[in-house]
């Protein structure tokens, strides 16, 4: 390698990348045999038990991947919403496969009172993908 500095730098960089890849591979080794561990699904639920809307994130094995963040963007006058962690039954999806349909998962639950409409924004981990949802609270 003497006399060819560029080749030496390229080899050093390549060896460094290979070493970093081997380390990263060992760190995620437990997931390598489970391709479903890499699939992220953004689930929704609600419509029963006083839950207007619910959201959660899970893989194909219905393992929780973290709680989403739900922000109230706007509501009709007189509509009050509560947003808190809880469990919900999966009834739909914002993204991904419905392999967890009908299962109870941890997530964030929205309950409300009043009559009118509400606009909420849901941000899902781990990438922060977000979607807007519009809820209608019927007269009781």
Image (cartoon, rainbow, N blue to C red):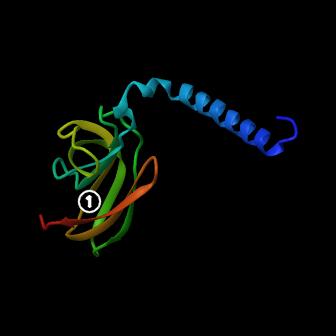
Q: Quadrant of the C terminus?
A: bottom left
Direction left: furthest residue:
140
Label 1: which secondary element: strand
Q: Position of residue 18 (x, y in %)?
A: 63, 32
Q: Position of residue 139 (x, y in %)?
A: 13, 68
Does residue 79 lie above or below 99 as drawn? below
Q: Nearer the viewer, residue 75 or 31?
A: 31
Direction right: furthest residue:
3
Left of 132 or right of it: where is 128? right
Q: Position of residue 53 (x, y in %)?
A: 25, 54
Residue at coordinates 41% horizontally, 56% vertically from top-left? 129
Residue at coordinates 68% horizontally, 37% vertically from top-left? 14
Left of 28 or right of it: where is 98? left
Q: Position of residue 135 (x, y in %)?
A: 23, 65
Within 10 Å of disc 1 (Cα), the crowding (few <14, some 14-19, many 20+) is some
Direction front: furthest residue:
3
Residue at coordinates 69% horizontally, 33% vertically from top-left? 15
Residue at coordinates 30% horizontally, 54% vertically from top-left? 110
Q: Which residue is mark 1?
A: 112
């Amino acid at each position: 390698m003497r006399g060819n500095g560029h080749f030496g730098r390229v080899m050093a960089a390549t060896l460094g990348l290979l070493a970093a890849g081997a380390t990263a591979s060992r760190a995620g080794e437990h997931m390598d045999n489970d391709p479903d561990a890499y699939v992220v699904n953004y689930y929704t639920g609600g419509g029963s038990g006083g839950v207007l809307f619910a959201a959660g994130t899970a893989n194909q094995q219905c393992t929780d991947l973290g709680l989403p963040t739900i922000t109230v963007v706007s509501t009709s006058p007189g509509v009050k919403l509560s947003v808190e962690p809880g469990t919900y039954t999966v009834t739909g999806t914002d993204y991904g496969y419905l392999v967890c349909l009908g299962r109870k998962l941890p997530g964030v639950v929205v309950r409300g009172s009043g009559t009118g409409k509400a606009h909420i924004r849901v941000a899902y981990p781990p990438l922060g993908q977000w979607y807007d949802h519009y809820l209608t609270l019927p007269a009781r």
